[in-house]
Image (cartoon, rainbow, N blue to C red):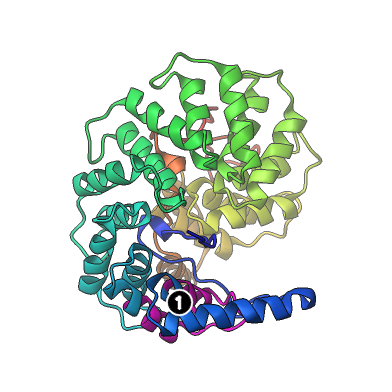
């Protein structure tokens, strides 16, 4: 059966369709006539009640494959096909109800249609059900029930020709067994499921498998194998894998130590949004030990990491504004970042606050406290992606510069983050 490849994501480990742009790409002129004939034929079959055609027409309208996005009509076609038992239509109808796309959000109907598709062994629906239980999205959070659905999806033979739900379930099973959440902790099972997804090209699973080889979690330690899996993960787009390659080159584990290559990998990871890599680049620019000192660049990278909730980056911004060598001193902004860092759990920030507050007036302090609370409300608690905290190791912590007495620097270590 013909099926078009449609990307799907469940954002934040909750069920969420990938909302694509309404401005779909126009068809190539050489294919306009053929495309028009195909669309007309598809619509004609859909109007006659063919469930596959109804589903494909719904997909065209939902994702704009024909140049027009109309999710209300898309849902109507999904409903027609779903009522005839088409599993793919039932899945998309369930997701539309879950996300409120083209129809009012209704978690009960979302569960009904996802379960209908899951009863037909539709892996994406099984994965989506697991994700809703993992996130507590529309149902009571239940990690054990999530694992039960992931196991169903992970073992499917992909009768519908799409492996996305299968791979994602295998990846989340690897995390569940690594952390002992929803299932007893079992690192060998974690490696088993990570390998399943990694061998199918899932980048975060490749990174997770590299981590297992690097630290001997459920498998014999093998730094060379770890590096190979990190590379595959990075090539697949994993920012975390690029960060781990940076750590490998910085520490000389599995590869000859090369600080410049480490910085190259940190930059790749940082540009992909990895907060730890952004922090490490900030450290490199602030210290001037590995690249020319540039406090402006340091501030830029610390700000990116700080916005993602990295407490060390928040603390170091306070240091730069308080005691930087080239940036103009700004004690009020320094106190703002120390206050935010303290809220984020920085062990040094509270002491830095207390040392800085006497130099400011009560009105300045009150204003800073208000700004800090506003920042915290706006940014909220930033969670790491599951691959980044799977093995629950502490983040790499490095001294950013020779800090003057007021901030009182913490000691650094060189353990990587999971």
- Determine which quarter of the picture holds residue 216: top left
Farthest residue in the right direction?
Answer: 292
Residue 73, position as x, y percentages in the image: 43, 86
Q: In the depicted view, which residue is nearer to us: 241 or 7?
A: 7
What secondary structure is marked by label 1? Answer: helix
Residue 396, position as x, y percentages in the image: 53, 34
Kindly identify the residue that appears in the image at 55 percent across and 27 percent down: 414
Kindly identify the residue that appears in the image at 58 percent across and 44 percent down: 238
Q: In the depicted view, which residue is nearer to us: 48 or 87?
A: 48
72 magenta-colored: yes
Residue 122 vs 49, above or below: the answer is: above
- In this rendering, does residue 244 appear at all? yes
Residue 375 vs 294, above or below: the answer is: below
Kindly identify the residue that appears in the image at 52 percent across and 77 percent down: 42
Prevalent SS, magenta region: helix
Q: Which residue is mark 1?
A: 58
Residues drawn in magenta = 55-79
Left or right: 354 as drawn, with respect to 138: right
Kindly identify the residue that appears in the image at 40 percent across and 63 percent down: 380
9 magenta-colored: no
Residue 350, position as x, y percentages in the image: 42, 49
Residue 36 vs 137, above or below: the answer is: below
């Amino acid at each position: 059966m013909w099926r078009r490849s449609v990307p799907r994501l469940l954002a934040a480990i909750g069920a969420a369709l990938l909302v694509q742009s309404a401005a779909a790409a126009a068809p190539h002129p050489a294919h306009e006539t053929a495309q028009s004939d195909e669309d007309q034929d598809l619509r004609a079959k859909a109007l006659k009640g063919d469930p596959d055609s109804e589903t494909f027409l719904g997909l065209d309208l939902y994702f704009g494959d024909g140049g027009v996005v109309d999710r209300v009509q898309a849902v109507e076609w999904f409903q027609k096909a779903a009522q005839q038992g088409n599993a793919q239509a039932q899945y998309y109808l369930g997701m539309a109800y879950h996300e409120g796309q083209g129809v009012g959000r209704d978690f009960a109907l979302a569960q009904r249609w996802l379960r209908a598709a899951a009863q037909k062994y539709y892996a994406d629906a099984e994965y989506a059900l697991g994700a809703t239980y993992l996130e507590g999205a529309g149902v009571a959070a239940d990690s054990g029930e999530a694992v039960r659905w992931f196991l169903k999806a992970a073992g499917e033979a992909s009768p519908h020709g799409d492996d996305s739900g299968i791979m994602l379930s295998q990846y989340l099973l690897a995390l569940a067994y690594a952390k002992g959440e929803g299932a007893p902790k079992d690192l060998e099972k974690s490696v088993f499921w990570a390998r399943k997804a990694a061998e199918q090209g899932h980048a975060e699973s490749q990174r997770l498998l590299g981590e297992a080889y690097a630290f001997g979690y459920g498998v014999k330690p093998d730094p060379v194998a770890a590096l190979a899996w990190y590379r595959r993960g990075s090539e697949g787009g994993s920012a975390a894998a690029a960060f781990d390659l940076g750590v490998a080159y910085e520490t000389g584990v599995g590869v000859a130590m090369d600080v410049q290559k480490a910085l190259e990998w940190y930059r790749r990871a940082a540009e992909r949004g990895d907060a730890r890599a952004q922090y490490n680049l900030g450290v490199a620019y602030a210290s001037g030990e590995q690249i020319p000192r540039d406090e402006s660049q340091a501030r830029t990278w610390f700000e990116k990491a700080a916005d993602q909730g990295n407490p060390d980056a928040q603390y170091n911004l306070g240091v730069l504004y308080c005691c930087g060598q080239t940036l103009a001193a700004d004690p009020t902004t320094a106190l703002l970042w120390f206050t935010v860092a303290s809220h984020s759990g920085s062990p040094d920030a509270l002491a830095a606050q207390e040392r800085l507050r006497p130099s400011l007036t009560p009105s300045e302090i009150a204003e800073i406290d208000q700004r800090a609370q506003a920042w915290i409300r706006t940014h909220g608690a930033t969670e790491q992606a599951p691959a980044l905290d799977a093995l629950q190791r502490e983040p790499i912590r490095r001294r950013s510069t020779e800090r003057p007495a007021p901030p009182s620097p913490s000691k650094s270590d060189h353990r990587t983050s999971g």
